[in-house]
Amino acid sequence: MRAVDAIMECLKAEGVEHVFGLPGGANLPTYDALYDAGLRHIQCRHEQGAGHAAEGYAKASGRVGVALATSGPGATNLVTAIADAVMDSVPTVFITGQVRTDLLGTDGFQEADVTGITLPIVKHSIMIRDPDEIPVAIHEAFHIARTGRPGPVLVDIPQDLSKADIKYEPVDTLDLPGYQPTTEGNAKQIKLAAKALANARRPVIYAGGGVVNANASKELVELCTSDRFPVTCTLMGLGAFPAPHEQWLGMLGMHGTRAANYSMDEADLIIAIGARFDDRITGKLSEFAPRAKFIHIDVDPAEISKNVAAHIPIVGDAKAILPKLTIEYRALKADSGRLDGWWQRIDGWREKYPLAYEDSADAEIKPQRMIEALYEVTGGDAIVTSDVGQHQMWTAQYFHFDGPRKWINSGGLGTMGFGLPAAMGAKVACPDANVVCVAGDGSVAMNIQELATCVTENIPIKVFIMNNGYLGMVRQWQELFWDRRYSSVDMGSSPDWVKLAEAYGATGLRAEDKGELTDVMKTAMETDGPVVCDVRVTPEENCYPMIPAGQAARDMVG
Amino acid sequence: MGEPATPELLNLDDLRESGSGRTGRKHILSLLVENKPGVLARIAGLFARRGFNIDSLAVGPTDDATISRLTLTVDGATHPIDQVTKQLHKLINVIKIRDLEPDEAVARELALFKITVDGDSRAQIMQFAEIFRGKIVDVHKRSLTVEVTGNDDKIEAFEEMVRPFGLIEMVRTGEIAVSRGKGTT
């Protein structure tokens, strides 16, 4: 059997049904095998789009996303998606073609050392040297991508080796002596954590994307509601705890709520679960949660005490640990009344500083209103992807995610142009779900070519462009911290998004008046096929509240 | 004392931070890694991007052809060793890491010193070499090359002794180490 045919067998054995990618010279053999392999291949217009689509697919479904690319530029076009996947721990496998082995190292046509280029941004990578290694390498890639702390794995296959004849036997065991993720969590530490919780008077549960990755939302809710523990989530964790819940404080961090950030500031005990104390959460590290002791639960031991020293570290999978912690805590029968004072304080903040904005006096659509309208129109029943910037933060604030895997965005890397291809991937993974992309007029242009993929492959996503004519978040920073010197943030003459959508064969809609907003959005949701909806919003609206970079929670403005 | 409903008391103030900050001493990290292409690049790249400095690095085969031994020395005064080892552990090809305590390990390094000599200094340097249990491995009318083995303190002491004579070159292997006693490193 040709090695490439063996790859198809391996993909099927891994349960792969969909792959995203683009053919080229060095992966011609792979595409020949794909021709009648029985997998659905979504032919993207750019490898970056394929990469983000694989991420969106993985984030929406929890399954491993797969993207294929050819050597050289095909592979380097994947780099942003790979870096994005490592930052946000997205289980993905990237299979790239490489030049023939006799050309390796000679600067051959379309040769790029993609394993070298991606070394710092992969969970693991495998450069194939012997065609007989290929089946094991593919299975190793999937195993490593999906277990432990998930992440991207790259398999680079020289063209001649991919064509080689090999003896294919299904692979049932893997030998990875250096890879044994801890999952269960140390029982003594869990007991100690329960005891600390029972003795805390001002606890906060701080949950991140790791809870979503671990499919541990239910377990998180159980723990949080085993008493009246206040809960906040990171940008990546939104939906892990239902936003409508009374114990929900809102998102924390740079554009989080005051209730969440002030609670962290005054907490005596913080339970971090699948979160990594990113600088957008902590602000000024030396003033972060100065009164708190930390319980840190994470499957990646290197995250523990990396940025903030943990007092009770627990390494393992949240899904395994949280139920044990809940049982241990319940057994202590702690007096819930000890939290009364804490809730009074928190409720004071919630009352005094609700998330709010001043609506326009005229027909102008405020960006916050746009997100509220989208929430109303969809009833919250949608998978929402976004690009990066103001629109992302407003979506995080005003779309009240009530379940996991409904909010798909680029948190760690902050990749503009992520949203549209991610929505495409999410829709392929979840064809029955409403999949909506909230984009900025700056970022949507970065992968707009994937509209052609959506039209060709019949992937009916709904893209809502929050069009303010600016690179809004950069403009906001220039306004606030750079003396209003608006340097290269005016988008000038952007395309007519309605006509552009139509040129691609999608439906284009526009909303300019707040009176028509919900109707236009409803039409967008009800129209078959891909839709682009250009929503004209206030050009210079700032996203608040905000902790200015490098400052502390107490310094929140707006 | 305390609330009756919370039977097991724990004063949060008694909790201590886990994980080490700076230890303030030199660490010898002995790694077993899969003998595969690119493993060294992964380790070197990891140190570079995380801002860790490698003081010395020695790589060699083990009794198992599929596994190599890497010995790294890292300064615990400037690095959180705990974080260094945890990051190394994340590399799939790294099988085992042992942070050797100085008094639980035997560490050795080999160094070659090429030293300028004249009629008078030749004998003196040969004498130093003898004191340090070094070996003269090359003789030239204007130079001597001495091989010295030992831990880094010894190598550095020898360097100090011969430097005034005119040290043309010094080449060091970096330390390798093995744990004391019967157990494996």
Image (cartoon, coloured by chain):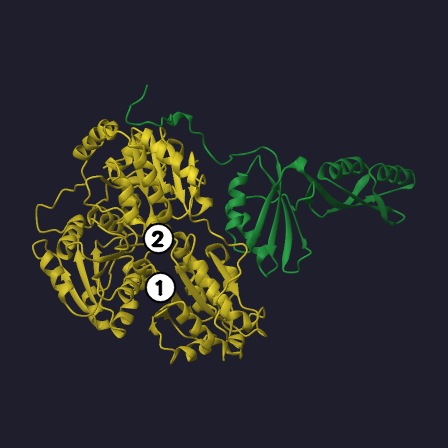
Residues A173 and A253: in front is A173
Say which amino acid is labelled 2.
Asn
Residue A73 placement: quadrant: bottom left
Give coordinates of residue A265: x percent, y percent.
Answer: 31, 32
* Image height of A90 relative to A455, above or below: above
Residues A37 and A152: in front is A37
Please name the color used to draw chain A.
yellow
Q: Position of A392 compared to B23: left or right?
A: left
Q: What residue is shown at x 57% (from left), y 71% (from top)?
A: A130
Q: Secondary structure at mark 2?
A: helix
Residues A63 and A364: in front is A63
Give coordinates of residue A368: x percent, y percent.
Answer: 18, 48
Callouts 2 and 1 on one subunit: yes
Residue A377 placement: quadrant: bottom left
The chain in green? B
Give coordinates of residue B81: x percent, y percent.
Answer: 55, 40
* Image height of A426 relative to A27, above or below: above
Q: Position of A483 compared to A75: left or right?
A: left
Chain letter for the residue marked with disc 2 in the picture: A
* Image height of A500 relative to A343, above or below: below
Q: Which residue is mark 2?
A: A213
Residues A284 and A214: in front is A214
Q: Which residue is mark 1?
A: A54
The count of marks equals: 2
Query: Does residue A322 appear in the picture of this structure?
Result: yes
Q: Quadrant of the C terminus of chain A?
A: top left
Say which amino acid is labelled 1.
Ala
